[in-house]
Amino acid sequence: MKHLLSIEDLDRAGIERLCDRAASFAEVADRPIKKVPALRGRTVLNLFYESSTRTRSSFELAAKRLSADVVNFAASGSSVEKGESLRDTVQTLAAHRPHAIVVRTPWAGASKLITQWTDAAIVNAGDGQHEHPTQALLDIYTLRSRLGSLDGLNVWVVGDVRHSRVARSLVLGLQTMGAQVTVAGPPTLVPAEIAVLGCDVRYTLDDLPQADVVYALRMQNERMKQAYVPSIREYAAEYQISSRRLGARQLLMHPGPVNRGVELAGDVVDGPQSLILDQVRAGVLVRMAVLYEVLASGGGPSSPPDGPPDGPERRRRRPSGGRDPFNNPELHPA
Ligand code: NCD
């Protein structure tokens, strides 16, 4: 995998492979020193044109835990404010020869465009209302860790689908993994065209009890150019997920940030059925796996070859032999 631009870049085997790799990194998070040398000598540039808490911090942590050098670029405070274009900004930063660029922009398709301007591996961390593939991967990872498999799982995605880049990647990714997906919300926020992705579309929550997993989406006020709901109170009355609506066996997810009291009632956010913080933790692991994979296939073999032990990290090699991602000689040459 050279780039990760869309969840459609991955088939089921590819998603499974990334989840397995993420699981193999889980142990690093429990170490006193949370670092492995897998990407030593590699540079990862985080290029963020939009605000972000979870995605940006987890990409940064992921790169650092793999021992890559990390440069964080935020559009605010940069020459973007002086009118520098996306292309000039990318080409300027690419002069530092990063191996990977993680990019979030308000423009659909921007990450794909950037692949034409640099040799670096590009990872889409959200492009406008289009896609957010690593979010879908971490959501799949979270469910897989909890349930083992997504085959036959019934997932309802509820809320502002229209303005959500999470929705598109999530619906496609969940279906690839064998889940059945229903999207639900008011007609103004759930475009009928979303059905082309193969999901069911509902405008009421009457059948919500059928869901195994309820995935709420944030009301994305910053993207709205007009009023899509009569009032937040009326929206909440019809579509808010609260302990009244969430059945005892249902799991709750949300990509964050949550608008408490709008799409979710506070009690369910902090309740025992909520996987929201598991999703955040999974974000670091899955992004480690993605960075590892794009840098491995761009600059070395994707399956680490066997090699003689030559240092403390090598001595930790697992009995599984050449598939230990922490010990790829190509990625941390002596
Ligand atoms: C999402 C985003 O920014 O696209 N959040 C995230 O990445 N964790 C969803 C959102 O903002 O609602």
Image (cartoon, rainbow, N blue to C red):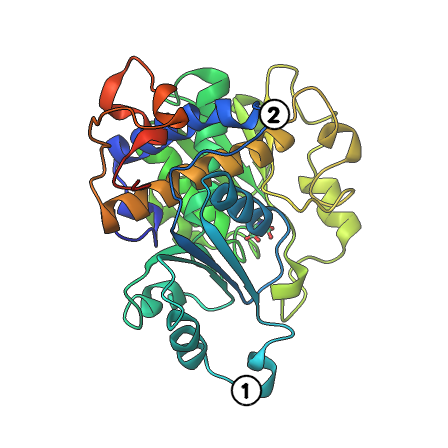
301 with respect to 310 (left or right): left
For marks 1 and 2, the one nearer the N-term is: 2
Up-down relation of residue 274 to residue 77 (above or below):
above
Q: Residues within 10 Å of mark 1 (few under 14, many from 20)?
A: few
What is the x, y in percent for residue 178?
33, 27
Which residue is at 25% across, 41% downward?
A: 330
Residue 277 at x, y percent in the picture: 64, 31
Q: Quadrant of residue 87?
A: bottom left
Rendering quarter of residue 21: top left
Q: Position of residue 183 (x, y in %)?
A: 49, 41
Local secondary structure at mark 1:
loop
Residue at position x 33%, y 51% in the image = 4
Q: Quadrant of residue 93?
A: bottom left
The one nearer the camera, 49 or 173, is 49
Which residue is more in the foreground, 194 or 174?
A: 174
Report the front residue among 131 and 316: 316
| Amino acid beneath label 2 | Pro
The residue tagged 2 is: 32
Q: Taking 30 as reference, is 9 above or below it?
A: below
- Amino acid type at circle 1 is Gly
Q: Quick check: can you spot residue 177?
A: no
Q: Which mark is residue 143?
A: none
Could you tell me if residue 18 is visible in this image?
yes
Real-space CA distance between mark 1 and mark 2, rounded to the nearest whole angstrom: 44 Å
Asked if residue 28 is positioned above or below residue 224 in the image, the reply reads: above
Disc tally is 2
- Dividing the image into 4 quarters, which one contains the C terminus? top left
- Which label belongs to residue 83? 1
User: Residue at coordinates 46% horizontally, 43% vertically from top-left?
Assistant: 67
Q: Nearer the viewer, residue 114 or 170?
A: 114
